[in-house]
């Protein structure tokens, strides 16, 4: 499993490189896009969701802001609070990231038949505690 995980990370990284996005930045973009707080997340929200220190989020946001994927906006209720908003460029980048992840998955799963993929999906779901793996 560990070897497969490393291989998947290498393949994903290779597919992300042309987009100029690191895996950590990709993850942050997905968190911002799917944040369920009713408004854009704060830096502290992102740090908690990503399970990293706030300084790490600042660096990621700086890079994504330089690439015009996110922007910092003041919270209308409390001007001292900064929220992180996805831009149109960020949404377009997310679409490209989804395609890159799909291509990476296809590359790693290419030796398997459709039936083998289905079995593997079920096994991985069970191991990860998905709906089929819960008692």
Image (cartoon, helix red, strand yellow):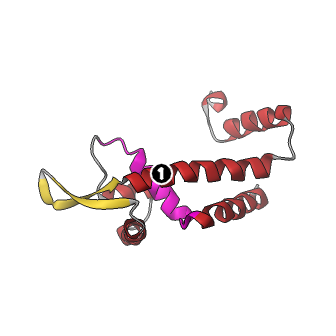
Tell whether 9 sits left or right of 39: right
Q: Secondary structure at mark 1?
A: helix
Q: Image quarter for residue 8?
A: bottom right
Q: Inspect this view and state whether residue 93 appears.
A: yes
- Residue 132: give x, y in percent of width and height: 66, 28
Q: Quadrant of the N terminus?
A: bottom right
* 63 lies above or below 96: below
Q: Is residue 29 magenta?
A: yes
Residue that mark 1 sits on? 92
Q: Inspect this view and state whether residue 49 appears.
A: no
Q: Is residue 36 magenta?
A: yes
Residue at x 42%, y 44% (from the top left corner): 34
Residue at x 62%, y 49% (from the top left corner): 99
* 34 lies above or below 64: above
Which residue is more in the foreground, 89 or 102? 89
Q: Callout 1: few (<14), some (14-19), or many (20+) C-alpha neighbours within 10 Å? A: few
- For the stretch drawn in magenta, what is the main secondary structure? helix
- Residue 40: give x, y in percent of width and height: 30, 49
* 122 lies above or below 47: above
Tell whether 128 sits left or right of 49: right
Q: Image quarter for residue 9?
A: bottom right
Which residue is more in the foreground, 93 or 9? 93
The residue stretch that appears in magenta: 19-37
Residue at x 73%, y 33% (from the top left corner): 122
Residue at x 50%, y 56% (from the top left corner): 27
Tell whether 79 sits left or right of 88: left
């Amino acid at each position: 499993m560990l070897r497969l995980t490393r291989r998947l990370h290498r393949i994903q990284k290779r597919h992300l490189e042309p987009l100029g996005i690191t895996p950590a930045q990709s993850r942050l973009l997905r968190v911002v896009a799917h944040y369920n707080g009713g408004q854009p997340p704060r830096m502290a929200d992102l740090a908690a969701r990503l399970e990293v220190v706030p300084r790490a989020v600042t660096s990621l946001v700086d890079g994504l802001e330089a690439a015009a994927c996110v922007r910092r906006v003041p919270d209308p209720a409390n001007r001292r609070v900064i929220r992180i908003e996805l831009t149109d460029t960020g949404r377009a980048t997310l679409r490209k990231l989804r395609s890159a992840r799909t291509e990476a998955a296809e590359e790693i799963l290419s030796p398997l038949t459709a039936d083998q993929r289905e079995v593997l999906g079920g096994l991985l779901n069970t191991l990860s505690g998905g709906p089929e793996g819960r008692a």
